[in-house]
Image (tube, helix red, strand yellow):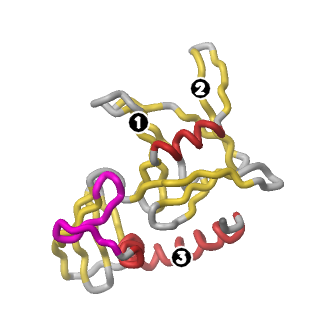
Amino acid sequence: MLSLDQILHDLDIADSQAKDRLSWNPARVGEIDIRIAADGTWYHEGRPIKRESLVRLFAGILRREGNEFFLVTPAEKLKIEVEDAPFIATLVESVEQPAGDVIIFTTNTGEQVPLDDNHPLRVIESPSDEQPRPYLMIREGLEALIKRSAFYDLLNLADIEEHDAGYSMTLHSGGQTFTITPEVV
């Protein structure tokens, strides 16, 4: 695992590159038969993309506009299909720091993201089965669905707090507190 300083440095670089990517407004707009399945698998013309480096390249130029997703380069903007969230958070760990522990998520594309104000957590309650569906903001409106095993690891890091209305679960990361409360959709 990278050090927290290295992760934050990498995020700063990614943020500066994002500003460049967000300024791209190509004249050529279209669609491409690429789909990101709910399990995080990328498909092209119905076949899984097996080259991780290609998936990471595409993930780096992915943009969300409203409820639509696009692969954007300076030359073209191509709409793709995303079934749920474009990323899956597959791993969660707590990193000890002098100012307080920081919770770090790792995605299926290898990105490492801390739980903080720029990368908040939200949990919705699935209307179909009433199960929690936790998501982490990765960047620029792009979220990662937190894999069930990673969510259980996250719950093990949570504190249970009693209130007049009942109980809540809270997480502490980087000196900040986050409540795990499902939103009903």
Q: Which element carries disc 2, helix, strand or loop?
A: strand
The picture places residue 26, in percent across and down from the top left corner, at: 26, 81
Q: Is residue 153 left or right of residue 42?
A: right
Q: Which residue is drawn at 22% across and 71% down?
A: 44
Q: In this view, does 101 lie to the left or right of 144?
A: right
Instruction: Say above or below: 44 vs 125.
Output: below
Region of the chain picked out in magenta, as a range: 37-50
Q: Is the magenta stretch mostly helix, strand or loop?
A: loop
The picture places residue 154, in percent across and down from the top left corner, at: 59, 42
Based on the picture, tell me whether residue 49 belongs to the magenta stretch.
yes
Disc assigned to residue 168: 2
Instruction: Say above or below: 137 vs 157.
Output: below
What residue is shown with label 3? Answer: 16
Q: Which element carries disc 1, helix, strand or loop?
A: strand
Foreground: 47 or 176?
47
Give the distance between the C-alpha atoms of the residues marked 3 and 2, in whole angstroms.
36 Å
What residue is shown with label 1? Answer: 124
How many numbered discs sit on the rendered protein? 3
Q: Is residue 119 left or right of residue 23?
A: right
Residue type beneath disc 1:
Ile
The picture places residue 43, in percent across and down from the top left corner, at: 25, 66
Disc assigned to residue 166: none
Give the distance between the C-alpha atoms of the residues marked 1 and 2, in whole angstroms.
15 Å
Q: Residue at x 32, y 84 (%)?
A: 74
Residue type beneath disc 2:
Ser
Tell me the crowding category of disc 1: few under 14, some 14 to 19, or many 20 or more residues within 10 angstroms, Cα based. Answer: some
Q: In this view, does 144 lie to the left or right of 77?
A: right
Closer to the chain start, of discs 1 and 2, is 1
